[in-house]
Image (tube, coloured by chain):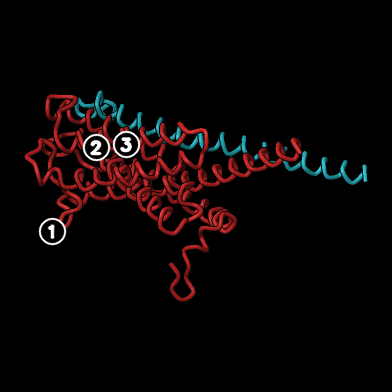
Chain colours: A red, B cyan
Amino acid sequence: MTSGRFSLHRYANPAVFERLAARLIPWTAGAAVLLLGFGLYYGLFASPPDYQQGDTVRIMYVHVPAAILSELVYGMMAAAAAAGFIWKHALADVFIKAAAPLGAAFTLICLVAGSLWGRPMWGAWWVWDARLTSELILFFLYLGYIALVDAFDDPQRGLKAGAILVLVGVVDLPIIKFSVDWWNTLHQSSSLMSLSGPKIYGSMLLPLMLMIGGFMAFFATVVMLRVESELLARRIRAWKTSAGEDGAA
Amino acid sequence: MSIFAMGGYGFYVWPSYGLTALAFALMLGWTLVTLKARRREEQALAALGKTRRARGKEKQ
């Protein structure tokens, strides 16, 4: 954790995090507004319809970023859970709790937008395809975590149980990623992240990349605000507990 | 009008963007409302703590 002058534990200090977040939030929020603004303009108005999919290709500009974020957020939660168990990182549980509802929302956007694309293109709202099913399982993992952390009287036990669930559920990420390669799926194979580079025409790649950047900047902004909010909730709980103990004494 | 029609696929394209906008508004709105409420509560508790400390000193 410590190499030379850099130490990850330095950023585990809530006070240091709050100072850093206060400096970063205006930048990430500004980036989100700009990237999403340009992404929407290019995605809805300035990019051409696909020669086969027609204008339904525009659904991809929200479906793909949501899919990437749904996996990325879960991966970050799993990394935080591991950091929490191995190094007792003070902000690990706070980050996981703050990120989970956002990850669930991105997964829901991905599933619904995908369904809205599937109806005109595949002729079905839903198919039990390996990619779709593993993404649905990811949505249930998010919901399971959210339900589990609040199911205990002792918040620390809830967070620990939730972190275990996150670590177990991480097995779903490679299944989502490689489902289109391992099985014969209706969902197309990866056209953005392939070894030979993106297989998307430049005029469609631009709005897609802008929207992916916008989704990431939006997530960074909101998750920092949510971590700050969770730290405040902890301080308030601690204050009330100590005030109660003082009163009892 | 063609932008609303989306080549005949408006029924599928616009709800995708509408749902995304709604989800983003809810994520941000819920976070900001909760954060604001907790900041107010923390300030109120800090003020209460100062009052209690002041009363404690007065009694001494």
Q: Chain of mark 1?
A: A
Near-viewer residue (A164 or A79): A164
User: Closer to the camera: disc 1 or disc 2?
Assistant: 2
Q: Is residue A57 left or right of residue A10?
A: left
* Mark with earlier residue (1, 2): 2
Q: Secondary structure at mark 3?
A: helix
Classed neighbour count for the residue bearing mark 1: other residues with Cα under 10 Å, few (<14), some (14–19), many (≥20): few
Q: Residue A184's quadrant in the figure?
A: top left
What is the total number of numbered labels drawn onto the structure image?
A: 3
Identify the residue at horizontal 30%, vertical 28% (top origin). Answer: B14
Q: Residue A126's quadrant in the figure?
A: top left
Q: Position of residue A206 (x, y in %)?
A: 27, 50
Q: Does mark 2 fall on the same chain as mark 1? A: yes
**Image disc number at residue A196:** 1
Q: Position of residue B13 (x, y in %)?
A: 26, 30
Of all residues shown, which one is farthest toward the left? A184
Near-viewer residue (A162 or A71): A162
Q: Position of residue A157 (x, y in %)?
A: 47, 40
Is residue A211 in view?
Answer: no
Q: Is residue A170 above or below residue A123?
A: below
Identify the residue at horizontal 56%, vertical 42% (top origin). Answer: A229
Disc 3 to disc 2, C-alpha distance:
10 Å
Q: Which residue is mark 2?
A: A135
Q: Is residue A209 above or below residue A188?
A: below
Is residue B31 in view?
Answer: yes
